[in-house]
Structure formats: structure tokens, C-alpha cells
């Protein structure tokens, strides 16, 4: 009898071993891990103690909020401070803290893994161009991300707490809670706020706006860049090509975004119009950073001009830096495509950036990521317009879809009004939009096959 039982057990274990899910690709661990976090977050937010009132959150409310927090998006279907209890708010903060830390850590570790999986020549090139991440730096990456995260969040939390305590007469415990929540939300580019108007009440307060904007900018720029800047900040000539591209494009997009917001909204009485020059400059500076993937707002996005929405669409689509808490196609992808076009217009056979030549494989990866992200935006936009009919205009739907797919969190105010089925589509969009660039980039980098023969060259007519 005992032998029969042992045989059955052995057969059962053998069946499980043969049929268990096999996560052979490194990106699969990321996908599974974030899915598990979303499931756990949904279960926690559905508890009655998580809401501020009788009853509990519906499945869609909990799922949408958990996905938005874990994927550090910031879109909401219920008012965060009005609907969730303190327990729910802390749970949401924990979700986007874990989500942001996981994104930075996993992205950086995948860079190390990709370097290890390359051939010798590619590994040497990667080591030279990503000096911030060596081939044996797994432990240093994890501790480095943790230390940088803690340093930024503690510093910003201290500034915000002091300001709320002194200028707004908040009790110490309340000021500390608000300061910590918004500091964590800012560095992780989550965009969640404990004020129903986001940060609109602080539109002219530089002690609130500037620390949050700086934290969001640094969180979105990426851990590899932050680590290299910490070592060689005053030696820009020694920076890797990745750092040079990320920093230069981030600064250019910030300047362009700030200028564009001020130019488009300067006389809009519903946004910048009532402010003095100093207030307009501060609000323009703040909103030059936010579309890069943060989601806070000090101006009423719903009242902005349609041209401003379109400009924000572009900034949200480009996003922030690789291996950071921001979204979008990433500034390095956008910059590389710009240089590809520039080289083609000049008739140059090679793409050169900062005295380095960029291989054709990397160019194809950038083009693939950009075009697939376009599809990720266009298809859901068409579906939503088809399902909702004339209820929502194209500009609002497009803004919402880009904000979800590029994990930004800015909204024209229609997310909560969408049918539950469409909100479910946005949940999928946030999840795919957050993990898509990571998994796709890793898959493309690791997919190296050498063709043993070459086909005759063809030349279709272009243009």
C-alpha cells in the first residue's frame, strides 16, 4: 500500500514537473511578477477596510487602481483621497513603490543579462558604452537602486513635510504623511495625489512644485544614467553614449515642453491666464516635466487648448529614459530615430552619434519599438471611438489612450466616465504599455541569429 502511494506521488510530481509553466526567457519573470503584484493589489483594495465608507470597492475599481499603481501610471476611476481609506492609500503607495523599484531594478538587471548573452565583440562594446553597469553587477544594481530611491524620496519628503508644516499649518503627522506619499509618488513617476485637484492648489508654490518636478525628472532618467552621473558628473566627455543621449534629449524635451505649455496657454483664462509672470513660469516649468511620464498637474488639463493636448501627446509618447520609472518609447529611441533620419537626409551610409557608430541591429530595434507603440495607441483609440460612438471626441480619447499606454497618468477627465469594458481595455493597455518596451527590448536584444547565406538585394520604390 505504501509503495502504491509512493508511486502515485512520484507520478503526480512527475506530471507537475512536465506541465508546470516554464519561464525560460528572462522577460517572462518580469511579466509574471508584475501580474502577481496586480492580483495581490486588487485583492487588498477590495477589502472593506481599504475604502472610506460602507462597503468595499468593486472589482473593476480595485483592478484599475492596482494596475495603475503597480505600473506607475496614475490614472484613476475614483477620487483617491475621497474614496480610499488611510489603509487603502498606504496600500496604493506600497504598490507604486514596489512597482517603481521593480521597474528600475529589473530593467537594469536585464541590461546586465543582455550583455552576458552577447558574443565577445558585442560584450566588449556594451561594456564600453554602458560603463555604469558591469557584467557582474547584479548585487550592486539592486543595492544601488535601493540607495538612490531612498536618498531621493527621503530628501523630497523632508522638504515637502517642512513646507506643509510651516506654510499650510498641517499637523506634523499629517504633513509627514502627505510629504512622504507625494515624494514616493513623484520619484516613481506614479502621479497619485492625496489632493482631489492633484497639485493645482500649489501652482505658485516653488517649494512644492520644484522638489516634485526634480524627483520626477531624476526618477524617469534611469538608474544607469544616475549612477554614471554620480561618478562623473563634472566629466561629460567621459560619459557613455547612452548617458549623453538620455541627458541631452531629456533637457531638450524639458525646455521644449515648458516653452510649448507657456506659449499655448499664456492667455488661457482657465489655466495660465490668471497667474502673474512668476506663476506662469513656474507652472510652465512644472508641466514641462510632467508629460514625460509623471502625471501630476498644477493646471486644469481638462481646460487646456486642443493644441496643448496634442503637444502633450507627443511628449507623453516619447517618454523618459530607459531603465527608469518613466514610460513612452524612451528618449534614446526617439533620439536614435532622429539621427537615422538625419544620416539618411545627408546621404551618409552610417549613423554616427557622439563619435560612435550605431549598428543596423540597434536601429531596427528602435524602429520596431516605435512602430509597435504606435499600433498600441492607434488600435485601442479606434476601438474606444467605435464602442462609445459620439460620446467622446477623438482628441480626448487619444490623450487618454496615450496617457495609459505610455504610463503617464495625465487625464482630460473622461477615464471615470468610460464604460467598465473600456476601463478594462485601459487596464490591459497600462499593463502592456509598462512592460511592453522592457520585454520587447529584451527579446530583440537576445534574439541573435546568424543567417548562413545572403539573398540577392532588391530595391522597392520608396516615397
Image (tube, rainbow, N blue to C red):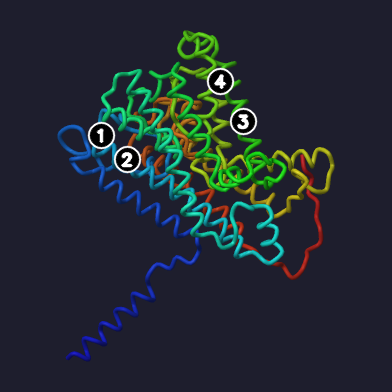
As rendered, which of 351 and 414 lies closer to the eye?
A: 351
Residue occupied by mark 3: 253
Compared across the picture, whether 462 is left or right of 146 comes to right
Q: CA distance from mark 3 to mark 4?
A: 12 Å
Labels 3 and 4: the sequence-earlier one? 3
Alpha carbon distance from label 1 to label 4: 32 Å
Residue that extends furthest to the right in the rendered view of this protein? 347
285, above or below 125, in the image: above
Contact flag, marks 1 and 2 (Cβ < 8 Å) = yes
Residues under numbered marks 3 and 4 in contact, where contact means CB atoms less than 8 Å apart: no
* Residue 51 placement (x, y as % from top left): 21, 36
In the image, is 415 to the left or to the right of 348? left
> SS of the residue at dot 1?
loop
Residue annotated with mark 4: 261
Q: Position of residue 424 (x, y in %)?
A: 37, 42
Instruction: Give the spatial CA distance, label 1 vs label 3.
Output: 35 Å
Q: Quadrant of residue 150?
A: top left
Residue, x 32% and y 43% (percent of image)? 63
Residue topped by disc 2: 92
Helix, strand, or loop for circle 2?
helix
Could you say whether the residue bearing mark 3 is in a helix, strand or loop? helix
Distance from disc 2 to disc 4, alpha carbons, whole Å, reads 30 Å
**In percent of the image, x 28 and y 29: which residue is there?**
81
Amino acid at each position: 500500500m505504501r509503495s502504491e502511494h509512493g508511486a502515485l506521488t512520484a507520478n503526480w510530481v512527475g506530471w507537475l514537473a512536465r506541465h508546470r509553466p516554464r519561464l525560460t526567457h528572462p522577460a517572462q519573470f518580469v511579466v509574471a511578477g508584475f501580474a502577481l503584484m496586480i492580483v495581490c493589489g486588487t485583492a487588498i483594495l477590495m477589502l472593506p477596510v481599504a475604502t472610506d465608507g460602507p462597503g468595499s470597492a468593486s472589482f473593476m475599481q480595485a483592478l484599475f487602481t492596482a494596475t495603475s499603481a503597480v505600473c506607475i501610471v496614475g490614472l484613476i476611476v475614483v477620487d483617491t483621497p475621497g474614496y480610499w481609506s488611510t489603509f487603502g492609500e498606504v496600500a496604493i503607495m506600497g504598490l507604486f513603490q514596489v512597482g517603481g523599484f521593480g521597474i528600475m531594478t529589473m530593467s537594469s538587471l536585464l541590461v546586465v543579462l543582455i550583455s552576458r548573452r552577447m558574443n565577445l565583440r558585442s560584450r566588449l562594446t556594451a561594456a564600453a558604452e554602458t560603463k555604469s553597469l558591469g557584467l557582474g553587477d547584479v548585487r550592486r544594481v539592486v543595492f544601488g537602486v535601493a540607495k538612490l530611491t531612498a536618498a531621493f524620496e527621503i530628501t523630497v519628503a523632508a522638504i515637502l513635510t517642512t513646507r506643509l508644516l510651516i506654510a499650510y499649518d498641517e499637523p506634523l503627522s499629517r504633513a509627514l504623511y502627505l510629504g512622504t506619499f507625494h515624494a514616493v509618488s513623484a520619484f516613481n513617476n506614479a502621479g497619485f495625489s492625496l489632493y482631489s485637484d492633484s497639485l493645482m492648489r500649489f501652482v505658485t508654490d516653488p517649494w512644492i512644485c520644484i522638489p516634485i518636478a526634480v524627483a520626477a525628472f531624476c526618477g524617469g532618467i534611469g538608474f544607469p544614467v544616475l549612477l554614471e552621473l554620480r561618478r562623473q558628473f563634472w566629466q561629460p566627455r567621459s560619459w557613455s553614449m547612452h548617458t549623453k543621449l538620455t541627458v541631452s534629449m531629456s533637457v531638450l524635451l524639458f525646455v521644449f515642453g515648458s516653452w510649448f505649455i507657456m506659449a499655448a496657454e499664456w492667455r488661457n483664462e482657465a489655466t495660465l491666464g490668471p497667474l502673474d509672470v512668476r506663476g506662469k513660469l513656474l507652472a510652465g516649468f512644472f508641466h514641462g516635466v510632467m508629460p514625460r511620464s509623471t502625471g501630476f498637474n498644477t493646471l486644469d488639463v481638462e481646460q487646456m487648448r486642443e493644441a496643448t493636448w496634442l503637444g502633450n501627446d507627443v511628449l507623453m509618447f516619447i517618454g523618459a529614459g530607459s531603465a527608469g520609472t518613466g514610460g513612452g518609447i524612451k528618449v534614446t529611441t526617439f533620439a536614435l530615430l532622429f539621427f537615422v533620419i538625419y544620416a539618411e537626409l545627408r546621404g551618409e551610409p552610417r549613423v554616427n552619434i557622439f563619435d560612435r557608430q550605431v549598428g543596423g541591429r540597434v536601429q531596427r530595434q528602435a524602429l520596431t519599438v516605435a512602430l509597435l507603440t504606435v499600433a498600441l495607441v492607434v488600435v485601442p483609440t479606434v476601438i474606444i471611438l467605435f464602442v462609445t460612438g459620439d460620446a467622446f471626441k477623438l482628441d480626448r480619447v487619444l490623450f487618454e489612450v496615450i496617457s495609459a499606454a505610455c504610463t503617464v497618468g495625465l487625464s482630460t477627465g473622461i477615464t471615470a466616465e468610460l464604460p467598465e469594458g473600456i476601463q478594462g481595455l485601459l487596464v490591459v493597455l497600462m499593463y502592456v504599455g509598462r512592460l511592453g518596451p522592457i520585454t520587447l527590448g529584451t527579446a530583440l536584444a537576445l534574439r541573435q541569429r546568424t543567417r548562413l547565406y545572403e539573398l540577392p538585394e532588391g530595391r522597392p520604390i520608396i516615397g
